Amino acid sequence: MAKAEKLKLAVYPGTFDPITNGHIDIIRRILRIFPSVLVAVAPNPKKAPLFSLEERLQMIRTATEGFHDLSVEPFQGLLINYLRKKGATAIVRGVRAISDFEFEFQMAMMNRKLDPKIETVFLMPSEEYSYITSTLIKEVAGYGGDVTAFVPKGVSEKLLEKFPR
């Protein structure tokens, strides 16, 4: 039996529209497990993002300033192809609830079929972030609610620009 390849580079893919404290929690925890992490930001026009790809990249870079062994970049196309190109060995996905797990499980099984050498790792967020979603943040901000407790510094200001009170 061939020796299993060690997990080296983990990719945390997503739309991050916008990045939340839940995402930051997952990134911190990934960095405790993997020697190197790449946050891969998808344009995802199907979701009709509030923020442009460049805005999302900048918000993530600002929110993760000072994090070591972390890079942030955009990606397009099939995630497995992107991981192969980067030499990554793992996909990390945050799972908040059973409803998340069902979809993520299907994606993980498809990715395993496409490339059995790439592992999918599920991380649950810390309890204090388990209910936070980017969609919920945008909805609260859109109605004039204060989201500063749920997003990294600077993101709430960007939301105010999109949803002036």
Image (cartoon, helix red, strand yellow):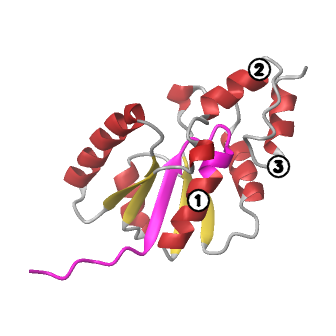
Q: Magenta segment: does it hold 65? A: no
- Highlighted magenta segment, given as a residue range: 1-23
Residue 74, position as x, y percentages in the image: 58, 52
Q: Magenta segment: does it hold 12? A: yes
Q: CA distance from mark 1 to mark 3?
A: 16 Å
Query: Which image quarter holds the C terminus?
Result: top right
Q: Earlier in the sequence, mark 1 or mark 3?
A: 1
63 relative position to 69: left or right: right
Q: Secondary structure at mark 2?
A: helix
87 relative position to 156: left or right: left
Residue 148, position as x, y percentages in the image: 81, 39
Taking the spot 49% from the left edge, 47% from the top edge, the residue there is 76
Q: What amino acid type is highlighted by mark number 2? A: Gly
Q: What amino acid type is highlighted by mark number 3? A: Lys
Looking at the magenta stretch, what is its main secondary structure? loop
In the rendered image of this protein, does residue 72 appear above or below residue 44? below
Residue 74 seen by the camera = no
Which residue position is annotated with label 2?
A: 142
Which residue position is annotated with label 1?
A: 27
Taking the spot 50% from the left edge, 55% from the top edge, the residue there is 12
Taking the spot 24% from the left edge, 47% from the top edge, the residue there is 109
Near mark 1 (Cα within 10 A), the count class, few <14, some 14-19 or many ≥20, is many
Q: Earlier in the sequence, mark 2 or mark 3?
A: 2
- The reply to whether dot 1 and dot 3 touch (C-beta < 8 Å) is no
Taking the spot 47% from the left edge, 50% from the top edge, the residue there is 124
Q: Which disc is residue 153 wearing?
A: 3
In the rendered image of this protein, does residue 11 appear above or below residue 154? below
Residue 23, position as x, y percentages in the image: 60, 49
Q: What amino acid type is highlighted by mark number 1? A: Ile
Residue 41, position as x, y percentages in the image: 57, 49
